[in-house]
Image: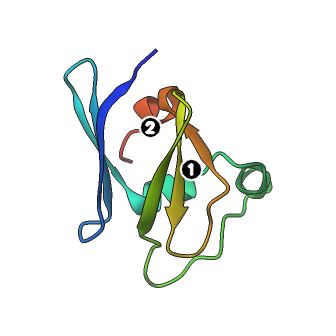
Amino acid sequence: MPYPQALRSDKNAGLLEIAWDDDTLQRLDSALLRHHCPCAECKSLRQRGKNHAASATPPSIRDVRLVGRYAAQIVFSDGHDRGIFPWVYLKELNQE
């Protein structure tokens, strides 16, 4: 299972940077993360062809909290904080 060596939220650039234990560095945009939030509410919206309320400015990352040794909880500037992002899920997310 992939495991991060370091997490850094660059609020100015709107990025979450993850240094993985395989020596790769991943940069994930906050809009991409918000769009792919794995919480039940967001999954349900995507299954119905909808998404969270879009705004002119994509939500930024306010905070990143560790959830045990398997995931991160990301708090977005729009107040959304219900998504738990497992390391495997984050590792597989790519910029679109």
Q: Are marks 2 and 1 in contact (CB under 8 Å)?
A: yes
In this rendered view, identify the residue nearer to me: 54 or 34.
34
Q: Quadrant of the rendered structure where residue 31 is? A: bottom left
Q: Residue furthest front?
A: 68
Location of residue 30 in the rendering, given as x and y in whole percent from the top left corner = 41, 60
Location of residue 71 in the rendering, given as x and y in whole percent from the top left corner = 53, 35
- At horizontal 46% and vertical 36% (from top left) the residue drawn is 90
Circle 2 is placed at which residue position?
93
Q: Is residue 42 above or below residue 55?
A: above
Task: Specify few, some or many for label 1: CA neighbours under 10 Å numbering under 14, 14-19, or 20 or more.
Answer: some
- At horizontal 63% and vertical 51% (from top left) the residue drawn is 83
Q: Quadrant of the rendered structure where residue 61 is? A: bottom left
Q: Amino acid at mark 1?
A: His
Q: Amino acid at mark 2?
A: Leu
C-alpha span from label 2 to label 1: 9 Å
In this rendered view, identify the residue nearer to me: 79 or 28.
79
Q: Describe residue 38's horizontal placement relative to residue 70 as left or right.
A: right
- At horizontal 60% and vertical 73% (from top left) the residue drawn is 79
- At horizontal 38% and vertical 39% (from top left) the residue drawn is 94
Marker count (numbered): 2
Circle 1 is placed at which residue position?
36
Please tell me the numbered disc located at residue 56: none
Name the element at disc 1: loop
Name the element at disc 2: loop
Q: Describe residue 39's horizontal placement relative to residue 56 as left or right.
A: right
Location of residue 6 in the rendering, given as x and y in whole percent from the top left corner = 28, 37
Return the disc, 2 or 1, that comes first in the chain's sequence: 1
